[in-house]
Image (cartoon, helix red, strand yellow):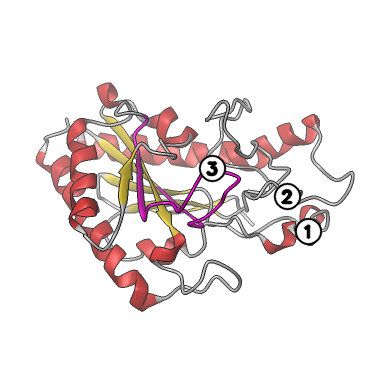
Amino acid sequence: MTPFTVTEGDSPVILGMPHGGTWLPDDLAARLNDNGRKLADTDWHIDRLYDGLLPGVTVVAATFHRYAIDANRDPSGVSLYPGQNTTELCPTTDFDGLPIWSEGQAPSEAEILERREAFHTPYHLALQYQIDRVRALHGAAILWDCHSIRSVIPFLFEGTLPHFNIGTNEGTTCAPLIETATRAPCMGATDFETVVNGRFKGGWTTRHYGRPEAKIHAIQMEIAQRAYLSAEGAPWSFDAAIAEAPRRVLATALTTLDRLARSGALS
């Protein structure tokens, strides 16, 4: 299986999906312990959540699971959140801090480099190509990095996560207009809680590509999975009825960003 899929469109908006994949090579899958084989830290059904929300949008999606390597981590292995609990470039634990590999099967430094070249690098080369292509078409590109996560994970954060978690690394990865256009429909949805640059300020993808001065804008949306799943546990079922309301919010935000970029307001 190839490490990513691409759906090319003519919109100035690109959806990045680094954590929706569930594929692992057989040799890696065999080394996971019972806990790791649950793949519980997947961004479950993230592709379905965003499907059809913006005509012509480009989608770059990783097919591999984050337990092989995390496509939203700095390839050097530097932590995104120094001093806070998090998972590594090649995770050895899940989001609850529990081991995911059988005894003696955690990746070595040499294997981490191999995984980086096999999975992480190809995904980001594909993403960079689409950013360059879209910017050439419109004079600006907007990368919307799509994520979801369980609502309650004490190892990573206190309490219950808001439904919409917007990350722009304290406003540095996109023009203020983009952050405002994303925040407004979320805040306007009174049944949902929203935070900007809270626990999730934007991962490596957002921080790496977001260069407003070069007309490349990046924003991360981390959605609490209770907003669209029937339950935050196996079998992690997508619930179309529950998802209808957050999909409307996301569609409004994405449509507004598309219109802004097409109007020349960002170029």
Alpha carbon separation for disc pair 2 and 1: 22 Å
Alpha carbon separation for disc pair 3 and 1: 20 Å
Q: Amino acid at mark 1?
A: Asp
Q: Amino acid at mark 2?
A: Leu
Locate the N terminus by quadrant.
Answer: bottom right
Residue at far top of view = 213
Q: Nearer the viewer, mark 2 or mark 1?
A: 2
Disc marking residue 91: none
Which element carries disc 3, helix, strand or loop? helix
Relative to 259, 23 lies left or right: right
N-term-proximal mark, 2 vs 1: 1
Question: What residue is at 38 percent from the left and 52 percent from the top?
Answer: 162
Which element carries disc 2, helix, strand or loop? loop
Q: Residue 145's image quarter?
A: top left
Q: Which residue is mark 3?
A: 123
Q: Which residue is mark 2?
A: 98
- Can residue 248 be seen here? yes
Membership of 223 in magenta stretch: no
Q: Write down the region rendered in magenta.
A: 146-169
